[in-house]
């Protein structure tokens, strides 16, 4: 009999494993009856999930894949596409730090014109950075007063540092990945999250629209031709 678990189920088990590991590091795991029951329920699912991942890795290796390629195969099979896209975008944003330090821009070919938008994002990023710092200081104070363990405080501090790094990486990516105009196309970008290429022959006109209540970074109407002819930059 072959037993298989849905991909989302394997991901849920992985998340539970991560939470359990963080709880152990933080010193928050206690041998209560509820904890024992939860461990008894999760342990078999966790074992099946890891066994399935190992089988995928071994099959990829037997097929001639390198270790890194085999790991990517396992990731593609078990991690949902939206999560993989988000992780890839965050890696690209972090890579923007190196470009920003060297004052380089990504994807601007010779003869192309870069259209910056990072300055308009600066007030929002500054507010987010301030909010993350205030939140981190407040949480650390609350945990210190409540007598939380050093492990729990370290986990919370690491999460706060990552939040701040995420905001700074978005700023770096916005500065190093501008919109680009070439003789062939208009490339619309927002950090590593949006990258839309529009052939110039499909653009009838371009105008500036200052909209402060937009719900999305980019929005296309039901008629793509109409959307392209009234593209806002």
Image (cartoon, helix red, strand yellow):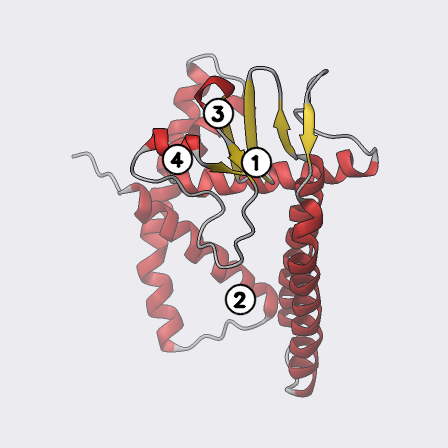
- Which of the two marks, 2 or 4, is nearer to us in this view? 4
Q: Nearer the viewer, residue 196 or 57?
A: 196
The residue wearing badge 1 is: 189
11 is higher (above) or lower (below) than 63 = below
- Which of the two marks, 2 or 3, is nearer to us in this view? 3
Cα distance in 3D space between marks 1 and 2: 39 Å
Q: Earlier in the sequence, mark 4 or mark 3?
A: 3
Q: Earlier in the sequence, mark 3 or mark 1?
A: 1
Residue drawn at the location 69% of the way across and 25% of the way down? 113
Residues packed near mark 1 inside 10 Å, few (<14), some (14 to 19) or many (20 plus):
many
Q: Is residue 79 visible?
A: no
The residue wearing badge 3 is: 198
Which residue is situated farthest in the top direction here?
A: 64
As drawn, is 196 to the left or to the right of 96?
A: left
Q: Are marks 3 and 1 in contact (CB under 8 Å)?
A: no
The residue wearing badge 4 is: 227
Residue 87 coordinates in the image, percent (x, y)? 53, 41
Q: Are marks 2 and 3 in contact (CB under 8 Å)?
A: no
- Which of the two marks, 4 or 3, is nearer to us in this view? 4
Q: Nearer the viewer, residue 9 or 95?
A: 95
């Amino acid at each position: 009999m072959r037993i298989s678990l849905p991909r989302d189920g394997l991901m849920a088990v992985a998340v539970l494993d991560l939470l359990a590991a963080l709880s152990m590091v933080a010193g928050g795991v206690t041998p209560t009856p509820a904890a024992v029951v939860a461990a008894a329920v999760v342990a078999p699912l966790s074992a099946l999930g890891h066994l399935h991942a190992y089988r995928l890795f071994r099959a990829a290796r037997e097929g001639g894949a390198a270790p890194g390629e085999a790991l990517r195969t396992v990731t593609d099979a078990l991690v949902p596409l939206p999560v993989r896209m988000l992780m890839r975008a965050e890696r690209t944003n972090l890579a923007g730090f190196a470009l920003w330090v060297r004052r380089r821009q990504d994807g601007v070919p010779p003869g192309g014109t870069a259209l910056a938008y990072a300055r308009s994002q600066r007030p929002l990023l500054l507010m987010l950075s301030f909010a993350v710092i205030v939140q981190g200081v407040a949480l650390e104070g609350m945990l210190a007063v409540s007598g939380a363990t050093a492990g729990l405080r370290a986990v919370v501090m690491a999460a706060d540092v990552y939040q701040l790094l995420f905001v700074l990486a978005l700023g770096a990516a916005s500065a190093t990945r501008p919109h680009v105009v070439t003789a062939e196309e208009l490339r619309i970008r927002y950090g590593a999250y949006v990258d839309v290429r529009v052939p110039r022959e499909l653009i009838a006109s371009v105008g500036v629209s200052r909209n402060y209540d937009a719900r999305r970074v980019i929005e296309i109407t039901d008629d793509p031709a109409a959307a392209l002819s009234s593209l806002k930059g």
